[in-house]
Structure formats: C-alpha cells, structure tokens
Image (cartoon, grey):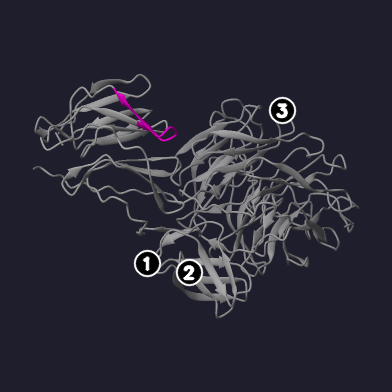
Amino acid sequence: MRRLQTSVAMLATLSVILTVAVGAVHAQTFSVLYNFGSKAADGSSPEYSGVLAQGRDGNLYGTTPAGGASSNGAVFKITPAGTETVIYSFDQTHGSDPLGGLTLGTDGNLYGTAYASGTSCCGTVFKITPAGALAVLYNFTGGADGGYPYAPPVQGTDGNWYGTTNAGGTGSGTVYKLTPTGTLTTIYQFDNTHGNSPRAPLVLGADGNFYGTTLYGGANGDGEVFKITPSGSLTVLFSFDDTHGRFPTSPVIQGIDGNFYGTTQSGGTGESGVIFKMTSTGTVTVLHNVDGINDGNLPYAGLVQASDGNFYGVDGNGGASGSSGTFFKITTKGAFSVVHDFDVTHGSTPQVAPLQHTNGILYGDTSSGGTGNVSPCTTGACGVFYSENGTYPAFIKLLPYSGKVGSKIGILGQGFSTSSVVKFNGVTATVASRTGTTYLGVTVPAGASDGLVTVTTGATTLTSLRKFVVHNSWGAGAAMPTARAGGAAGVINGKVYVVSGETTGAIVGNNEIYNPATNTWTTGAAIPTPRYVPASAVVGGILYVMGGIKDSSQSPQAVVEAYNPVTNTWSTKSPMPIAVDSANAVVQNNLIYVVGGFASGARSALVQRYNPATDTWSTVASLSTAK
C-alpha cells in the first residue's frame, strides 16, 4: 500500500474573552484632579484626539498644544492623585503645538510629535525622558517626508517607530518609519483615493501590521480605515459613507475579541457621529448612532476597552449642558449609556481618549472648562484633568505583547515587590529589573506559549487583559479524540475542523471540531464518503473536501462534499474533472484551486479550479513540474 505521511501545521489565534458577572453594578465616581492654567507657565487646552501614556513610574504623561513657558505648548506629568508638573515647554526650535499626546517606548522614554516649527517649517518627532530631557529625533520639511503631524508615533515589533503626517508627500499626508536614532523613511504617501489627512495615531495589531484612519479621502471622500505593513503595503479596509459615519479624527483600537472599534465625528442617522466595530477584513457594523443631544455630539476621540470588557469614550459636544460633552460607556453589543455629563466648571469639550491606568481607574482631560485662570487662560478656557472610578479591576500592561523566548518584556502595574512572581501562560519568568512598585522588566521563559501573563505578589494576582504571543515557539493543545493521518482540515469562525483520514488501517469519516478559545473538542456530522489524503478548503464559511482515497483499492476519487457548520450537514457537489488524491488546495478570490497530487498512479501537474458560487469546475494552466 502506498502511504503518504502528511504533516499538517495549524495555527489558531486564541481569543481571550473577559467575562463580567451578569448584573454587576459599578459605582461611578467622576473627579476633577487638576485644572490646567492654575499656575504660571502651565499647559493648557489638551485637544485634537490625543492620547495619554502611563509611565514606568506609574504617573500619567500628556501634551498640551498651548501654554508652557513660551506659549508653544508643553509636556506634563500628573500623578494618579492629581499633582501636575510641566516637565518641558516647547520653544519653536524644538517644535510647537504638540497636539497628539505621547506613547511609551520599551526603553522607558516617551515619544511624541510637535505639529509645527522645528528647524524647518513643519513639525518634529521627539523623545523625552520622564525627567523632562527632550531630544528632537526628526524635523519634517513638508516635502516627501511629510509635515504637520497630529499624532505621536507607535513602536513596532522591530523596535522602530511608525507614524503619520497630516500633510506633505503628494499633498495628502504620509506614513513614516523612524529608527530610534532618527533616520526617517517615508513608507507611504496618501493620494486621496487611498486616504487623505491622517490625524490619529496608528495602532499596532496583533498580526504585527498597523491600522489607522484618515479624516478625508477614500472611495467617498468621507475618510477610511486602512491597514499598512511595516514595509509600506497599504490596504483600504473600509471607506466611510455617511451611513456608517464620516470624518474619523480618532484611532481605531483592537478589542480583546480581535475586532477593531472606533468613532467618527460625523455621519450616522443623526449626523452627529457613530461608534463602530470593524472586523480585521473590513466589515463595519455601526454599534451606536450618536443622537447629538442626550448622548452627546462630535466624538472626536477614540475608545478604550476597560478591564470590565466595556468600551469608554467621550463626546466633544452635547449632553445635559447642551455643549460641554459627555463621558460614555458602550458594550461590545452596542448598549450605550452616558456615565457623566461635562459642564464648564468641571471641564468641557473633551477631545482626548480616556486611558485606563493599571490601577483600574480611567483618566482623561478636556480642552476647555475648569477653574484655571492664570494667563494666558481665562476662566473656563484651559481644561481639566479628570478621573472616572467605576471600581474596575486592576490589571497589568505588557510592553510589547509579543516576543521570542529570551526577549525582554516590560510590565506596568502596581504593588510589585522583590517577591513578585511573573508567569507567562503558567510558566515562571525571571524578573530582571524593577522600578519601585510599578514596573518589572522580565525575560520570556523557555517553554512559554501564547496566553495571559500574571504577576502574583503575596495574595494578589494581576493579569494582562490581552494574551502575550510567543513568536518562534510551540505550544500544546488538547489531543484529538481520534488519532488520524491524512485527514482534511479547515478553520471556520475560529474553530478548527478535522475530517476523515486513516486510523489503525481503516479510513474513517470522523468530523472533530477544536475550539482554541476553550481548548476543547466536539463532534460534528461525519462525512458521507470517508477518505484518506483528500484536499480541503474553506470558502464562505463552508468546508469543501475534494478527492482522496476511499478504500484499499487506492484509486483516486473525484467526489466533492461540502460541510455547513451552521446546519451540521453535508451536501454533494459537482465532481472534479480529474480524480486525484494527495493534492493541495488554495483559495483566491473565493475560487478553490486544487493543485497536483496523484492521478492514475502518477504524480500530476493538473491545476483544477472550482467555483463554489456556480458549483462548476474548470482546468487552468498546469504546473511546470508534476508534484
């Protein structure tokens, strides 16, 4: 008997689902921690969809485009209790108008952009230490390198920094890569068709690519969501169309479920903006249409997914006061509620996404309102820094969320000590460094696999909200119920289907289903025609099993059968033109190509193409070498 040993490697992404007890009620406590403009040379008016950063020291860091010693903007530090310090005042030479906030690097420094000035016309990228020592890494010229950046850069898995400029390039903005030493490469120039005027920060996806939005451009001129690889290959995932929102100024974020979530400042049924969900392939669902009145209006800022599993954000206008905005909560299913209505005294016009500190508390700032009135502010003009405490669970953040065994990873949290024990999916790691009670530097241990990271200090265990992905490593899942060789396999909606194959000398029709999220197996309807070494492929949520050997005669079969997991049923499709076994199958543009294999006892060069939509087969150009 001719036997082929088939090695099938399957990679499944584990979706971590954060479960919250039904009926749990959080007591919401809103507090103004600081009024900008309360002292001389203070920062003021944080705005334009910026972001806040939590430092290794447990403090929060951000930028204001106005104020500071020279009125060119400032970088501020604020403790979780509300003690604010301006650590740097911009002076035009080093940039001015830092609009977008800061991001924390793996080196412990903070990175951001100034919208204007520098040694040229058009803004800078800078690095600043927590103590306030600032170094300009790059001065934009407004040419092919881009100019006038709104957003801070984000760090990629390669250690380089990636960001966008609002202008420059061919006129519609750019995406750039910047080395830690300041060498800039423009990796993409927007052309309006593929987007125009990116203002929000990029987000690093779990796949290592970057996701972002443009304010304008795209198919309808209403802005878009795009994906771009570190090498600069850009894909427009969705073009906004007014119905699904328009003019996004905010970034998307990747949720715990792997989908992306964001806001648009306009569009929707009330033309007051929307909150949306987008799959990784670009299918957008509107979770909520902002009503422009009670909900708020103009959601300039993005969202944060908190440790209770819900999303939180702000509207820059509307609400109970009529024009000061709201702080809201929305579930993954779209249930929306206003948590807090801003007023002038306690802040107004929030344009910065909330940040959840690892202590569980949400923090943010507003672009106006408050009681600060030191020049150049007037009462109600400078903004506030606030907290919203819903008694959300404390947790840990990882920098970054992926790496190889032996790589160095940073952990942000609280309550750490010399007795803290770190585990990567249950495997103990070595703690290499510690900063007070709020930061640990650890080494990814041998034997680590994809999963959650925990830090246990005494009786307290803190857990990461997202899984850590261990590159270049193996993990083990629950064993298959039936050991088999030469079966068919496919992934549908995150579950792995293993069908048919040979076991202990017999060909069986078993259909066994693996759920990576729960590490469990279940059983589906058996395939009508059991086969050994068939080809298989998935199109439109249907698993197609083609060809193979069905008995000891070793004769290749032409039979094609399709499994629908929704109905748990099989159906017979048009047979293959030429019967084959041991072939490979790939999908392109919803067409299945069955390549090579054995036909009539010899290696085959055939390439047969199947169209599931019409249930028809055709042949295309053969392989140059039979395989």
Q: Is mark 3 on a helix, strand or loop?
A: loop
N-term-proximal mark, 1 vs 2 = 2
**Secondary element at image label 2:** strand
Which mark identifies residue 261?
none
First in sequence: mark 3 or mark 2?
3
Q: Decide: few, some or many residues near mark 3? Use Cα within 10 Å; few <14, some 14-19, many ≥20.
A: some
Identify residue type, mark 2. Lys
Name the residue beneath numbered marker 3: 269
Find residue 250 and report its horizontal and vertical position in percent: 65, 43
**Residue at the image point whose x is 69% and y is 63% from the top:** 60
50 lies above or below 447: above
* Residue at the image point whose x is 61% and y is 32% from the top: 223
Say above or below: 556 vs 87: above
Q: Do the residues labelled 1 and 3 touch (CB within 8 Å)?
A: no
Q: Which of 336 and 133 is in front in this view?
A: 336
Q: Is residue 47 left or right of residue 403?
A: right
Q: Position of residue 287 (x, y in %)?
A: 65, 37
- Looking at the rendered structure, the kind of residue marked 3 is Thr
Give the dominant element type of the magenta stretch: helix, strand or loop.
Answer: strand
Residue 90 showing in the rendered view: no
Q: Mark 1 points at which residue?
A: 447
- The residue at 84%/44% (across/down) is 324
User: Of the residues shown, which amino acid type is indicated by label 1?
Assistant: Gly
Label count reads: 3
Assess disc 2: are there few (<14), some (14-19) or many (≥20) residues with their C-alpha within 10 Å of its C-alpha.
Answer: many
Q: Give the range drawn in magenta.
A: 563-573
Residue 423, label in figure = 2
**Which element carries disc 1, helix, strand or loop?**
loop
Q: Where is residue 83 in the image (x, y as percent from the top left)?
A: 78, 68
Image quadrant in which the C terminus is located: top left
246 vs 525, nearest the viewer: 525
